[in-house]
Amino acid sequence: MARKKSKKISVNTSGKRKTAVARATVRKGKGRVRVNGEPIHIMGPSLAQRKALEPVQIAEAMNRLGDVDVHVDVVGGGQMGQVDAIRTAIARGLVKWNGGAEGDDEELRDEYLRFDRSLLVNDPRRKEPKHQMGRGARKKWQKSYR
C-alpha cells in the first residue's frame, strides 16, 4: 500500500532584524513574491530589491522553487533592517515548504547557510540604550575645568 504524499496548504514563517519584523506566507501559486501587497520588483532601491530576492534566486538555481507564491508583511525598523527581515522570512518559508510533511529541506538549508548564515538565523544585535550623563550610548557631556 502506497502512502499518500501530503503537501502543506501554506507555511507561515517570520524574520527579524533590529526592530523590523517580517511575516511570510508561502503557498501554492504562480511564482509571485509580494511585500506588503505590492510586487517585490517595485520595492525601493535596486540594492535592497536584489538583497531581498537572494533566497528566491538560490532556490531557483537548485530547482527547489516550483510554483509558489510568497506574501510578506513587514513592519517596524528602517529600510535595510526590513530587507534583512524579509530575506530571512522568505528563506525560512522556502526551506519549510520544500521539506514537506517530514520537516525541513536539508539541502536547501545547507546551501542557504553556506551562502549567508543570516538567511536562516535572526540577527540578535539591538541598539544600545542612552545612558545618563551623556547625549547617547557612549558620548558623555564635555567638562571644562577653566
Image (cartoon, rainbow, N blue to C red):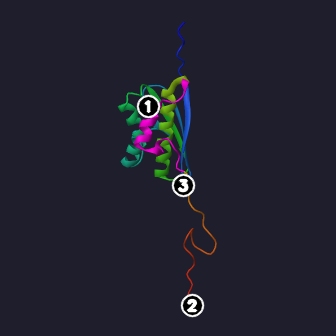
Q: Is residue 8 visible?
A: no
**Callout 2: helix, strand or loop?**
loop
Position above or below: 120 against 146: above
Disc on the earlier residue, 2 or 3: 3
Position above or below: 84 against 129: above
Neighbour tally class for label 3: few under 14, some 14-19, many 20 plus, Cα within 10 Å: few
Q: Residue at x 44, y 33 (%)?
A: 108
| Residue highlighted by disc 1 | 107
**Callout 1: helix, strand or loop?**
helix
Q: Nearer the viewer, mark 3 or mark 1?
A: 1
**Callout 3: helix, strand or loop?**
loop
Query: CA gap, disc 2 to disc 1?
Result: 65 Å
Q: Residue at x 56, y 33 (%)?
A: 12
Q: Point out the stretch of residues depicted in magenta.
A: 102-123
| Disc number placed over residue 145 in the picture, else none | 2
Residue 112 appears left or right of 140: left
Query: CA gap, disc 3 to disc 1?
Result: 28 Å
